[in-house]
Image (cartoon, grey):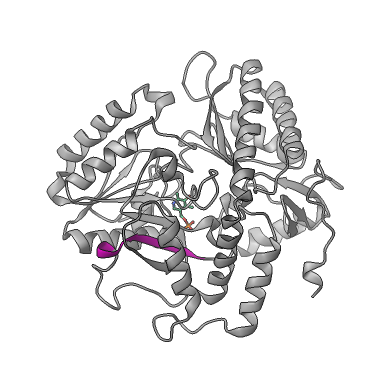
């Protein structure tokens, strides 16, 4: 099998550009794409990828990009991790599909056992597997409603939960996620979050504000669930003030409301721990996983208190592809990799390097208003100097300049003024330093 036998470029410090960006073959493919693919599936950078390795993406023109987005935090343990490839290949040779709810298989059960061990809390837990993050969100809401017999669900300001019908109603941003796609699902409410850089509130104050909204706008008697990303992803890696999430959860528990942690972007090693909830001493009732769980194969999970997960009637949950055996095999390999512990250390190293480098950049570029995050989930927010007002337009310009030099950066934030780092844990400090130099130069050029 030659797929496992490719040159190891993982430690090269810099991107390698052979053509202008996008190159001629990418431009050709892009013309075909525009003719054949719905414009609803937008694009960030029209370079067409041929292969990948560790922290690198290689495009069809032979350009090698440093991938600091990991397909939005999916290939966390590195592109083409050898044990994931081996596990998926072995499963492909055995059986690719039976449908777990018709004729089951061991891997699904094993992954449920592992999630029960690794998600926060020592209580009895059960899991369900589906295909995408949005589907995990939908199922968690169904389960919470069935368990509580209540109708309403509350999401936080700046939240992102997906693009299916229910999930799009739960997102902060109507544009582009909901515009023109209504009617939206009813009984979804949005309440203020904790955003220390913008609101200046302590965790206790922010929680009191959120709880007042929950009690006044919805009322606990009708509220099935509160859903929160422990660190908000698309919202711009907003880290809530200390004590905020714990206070929110305490209120939820006291009022019979299911507390759902959406760890789809923040979970599974990304922040240097199994789950970001651990940074906040949070023990959610339900935990949602997807993105990094199977290193790129489609899979998502809902894991939580056994009595809540069992509220659903047999046959009420599931789906044809949910918990596909090849995806599950890849996920089991991801868990084995994370279990070794050096990936957590790598996430912590990456976080320390980025935080130090970005703090130094902030001293030179007053437009950097905030540096935040945990582990390999770090972002900086661009503000009008001396204020916390969003500096518009600069984040996309910096990302574009970096792409022209072979570094793929993602923007984020409800105002589009945040640059977020979701590197693979295979990224070296030398590669991060190179990216920081490019960002430094881009900020100097554009600011
Ligand atoms: C990406 C994401 C989702 C949606 O996941 P899909 O697999 O794209 O449906 C939900 N919640 C969070 C926090 C996410 O980052």
* 373 up-or-down from 253: above or below: above
Screen quadrant of the C terminus: top right
Screen quadrant of the N terminus: bottom right
Q: Quadrant of residue 13?
A: top right
Q: Residue furthest right?
A: 18
Q: Is residue 174 magenta?
A: no
Task: Report the number of numbered marks.
Answer: 0
Q: Position of residue 92 (x, y in %)?
A: 63, 79
**At 61% from the left edge and 35% from the top edge, which residue is drawn?**
396
Q: Residue furthest left?
A: 221
Q: Quadrant of residue 355?
A: top right
Q: Position of residue 285 (x, y in %)?
A: 30, 53
Q: Nearer the viewer, residue 120 or 133?
A: 120
**At 77% from the left edge and 37% from the top edge, which residue is drawn?**
430
* 416 up-or-down from 18: above or below: above
Q: Is residue 305 magenta?
A: yes
Drawn side of residue 332 relative to residue 208, left or right: right
Q: Position of residue 372 (x, y in %)?
A: 52, 31
What residue span does the magenta drawing correspond to? Answer: 299-308
Q: Nearer the viewer, residue 140 or 202?
A: 202
**At 59% from the left edge and 67% from the top edge, which residue is drawn?**
330
Q: Quadrant of residue 366?
A: top right
Drawn side of residue 50 relative to residue 147, left or right: right
Drawn side of residue 270 relative to residue 170, left or right: right
Mark yes or no: residue 172 visible.
yes
């Amino acid at each position: 099998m030659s797929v496992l036998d490719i040159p190891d470029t993982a430690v090269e410090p810099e991107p390698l550009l052979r053509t202008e960006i996008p190159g001629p073959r990418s431009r050709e493919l892009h013309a075909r794409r525009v003719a054949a693919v719905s414009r609803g599936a937008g694009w960030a950078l029209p370079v067409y990828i041929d292969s990948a390795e560790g922290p690198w993406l290689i495009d069809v023109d032979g350009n090698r990009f440093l991938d600091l987005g990991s397909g939005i935090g999916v290939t966390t343990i590195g592109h083409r991790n050898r044990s994931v490839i081996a596990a998926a290949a072995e499963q492909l040779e055995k059986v690719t599909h039976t449908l777990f709810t018709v004729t089951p298989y061991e891997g699904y059960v094993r992954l449920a056992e592992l999630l029960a061990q690794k998600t926060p809390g020592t209580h009895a837990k059960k899991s369900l597997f589906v295909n995408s993050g949005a589907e995990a969100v939908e199922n968690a809401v169904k389960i919470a409603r069935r368990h509580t017999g209540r109708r309403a669900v509350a999401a936080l300001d700046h939240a992102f939960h997906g693009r299916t019908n229910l999930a799009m109603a739960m997102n902060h941003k109507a544009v582009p996620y909901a515009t023109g796609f209504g009617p939206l699902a009813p009984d979804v409410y949005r309440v203020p979050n904790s955003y220390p850089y913008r609101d200046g509130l302590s965790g206790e104050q922010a929680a009191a504000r959120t709880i007042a909204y929950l009690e006044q706008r919805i009322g606990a008697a009708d509220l099935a669930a509160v859903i929160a990303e422990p660190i908000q992803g698309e919202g711009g890696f907003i880290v809530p003030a200390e004590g905020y999430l714990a206070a929110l959860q305490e209120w939820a528990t006291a009022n019979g409301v299911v507390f759902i942690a959406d760890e789809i972007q923040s979970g599974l090693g990304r922040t240097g721990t199994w789950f970001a909830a651990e940074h906040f001493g949070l023990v959610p009732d339900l935990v949602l996983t997807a993105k990094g769980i199977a290193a790129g194969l489609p899979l998502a999970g809902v894991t939580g208190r056994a009595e809540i997960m069992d509220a659903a009637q047999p046959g009420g949950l599931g789906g044809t592809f949910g918990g596909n055996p090849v995806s599950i095999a890849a996920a089991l390999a991801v868990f084995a990799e994370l279990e070794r512990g050096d990936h957590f250390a790598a996430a912590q190293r990456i976080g320390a390097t980025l935080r130090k480098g970005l703090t130094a950049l902030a001293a030179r570029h007053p437009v950097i208003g905030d540096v935040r995050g945990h582990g390999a989930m770090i972002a900086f927010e661009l503000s009008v100097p001396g204020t916390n007002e969003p500096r518009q337009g600069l984040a996309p310009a910096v990302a574009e300049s970096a792409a022209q030099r072979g570094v793929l950066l993602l923007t984020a934030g409800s105002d589009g003024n945040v640059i977020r780092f979701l590197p693979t844990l295979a990224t070296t400090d030398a590669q991060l330093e190179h990216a920081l130099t490019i960002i430094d130069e881009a900020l100097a050029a554009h600011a």
